[in-house]
Amino acid sequence: MIRLIAMRELRSLFTLPSTWLIFAALQFVFAWFFLARLEAFLEVQPQLAQLANPPGVTITVAAPMFNTIALLLMMLTPMYTMRLIAEERRNQTLPLLLSAPLSELHIVLGKFLGMLVFLIALSASVPLMLYSLALGTELDHGLMLSNLIGLLLLTASFTALGLYISALTVQPVIAAIGALAALVGLWLADIGASAPDSPWHAISPLGRFQNFNAGLLDSSDAMFFVLFTGVFLLLTIRRLHNNRTYG
């Protein structure tokens, strides 16, 4: 049942003309950033060649690209998660969904996985662009893998938070604004905190992603993303359970 709900979400997303327009625009933006970073690397490559241990193309091109994708996903994810439950409630189809022989767990995980697959598909072209550099140079596959794992965990956390806020309101626009405000607020609090031991560093998804972006696979960062995602999924399940129980 989870797979069916996920496929339903994917079909509804890919049938929207706006999805394909945004997809095309994103590929243009990704290609532009990629070529700009590559051009900047080629311009300084003669100077880098004189260094004893020069940074490679993975550090100077791939890592900044993954950081750019993370920022773009922070802005884009609320635009898509806003409709997951809020639109069901606004269109009065949520009572029908809750009356079906489906548990709240099936509904939440189905919508979550469908949206996660969709967001991964939106950004899948970037790793392909970056791995095309392997045709002319050597890539740091460990750094690439670290960024891919971090980006997957980051996307999952964004999706879980957006899904929960979508479950709190009837209006998708309010859900989008709320999710964006929460994500941007955590990010700004993280970069604005001056103390190294500030708790804002510990609870900011984008702040936690920086270790993955630098090639550091820290189990505490991975556990943070798992717990962050799990907490908001559990809160969403609880919210739907209350809707089913109390109407």
Image (cartoon, grey):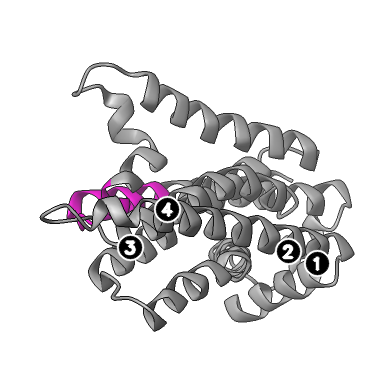
Q: What stretch is highlighted in magenta?
A: 211-230
Mark 3 vs mark 2: which is more N-terminal? 2
Residue pictured at 38% horizontal, 46% vertical: 228
Q: Could one spot residue 120 in this view of the protein?
A: no
Image coords of residue 49 (percent x, y): 23, 58
| Lateral position of residue 84 relative to residue 204, left or right | right
| Lateral position of residue 223 relative to residue 69, left or right | left
State the separation of the CA atoms marked 2 and 1.
5 Å
Quadrant in the rendering for residue 23? bottom right
Magenta includes 72? no
Judging by the rendered image, the residue that carries numbered circle 2 is 23
Image coords of residue 179 (percent x, y): 61, 37
Image coords of residue 198 (percent x, y): 25, 21
Q: Are marks 2 and 1 in contact (CB under 8 Å)?
A: yes
Judging by the rendered image, the residue that carries numbered circle 3 is 58
Residue pictured at 76% horizontal, 64% vertical: 24
Residue placed most toward the observer, 140 or 145: 140
Q: Which amino acid does label 1 sit on?
A: Trp
Q: Which amino acid does label 4 sit on?
A: Glu
Query: Quick one: SS at disc 2?
Result: helix
Residue 43, label in figure? 4
* The N terminus: image quadrant: bottom right
State the separation of the CA atoms marked 3 and 1.
30 Å
| Lateral position of residue 167 relative to residue 229, left or right | right
Residue placed most toward the observer, 237 or 213: 213
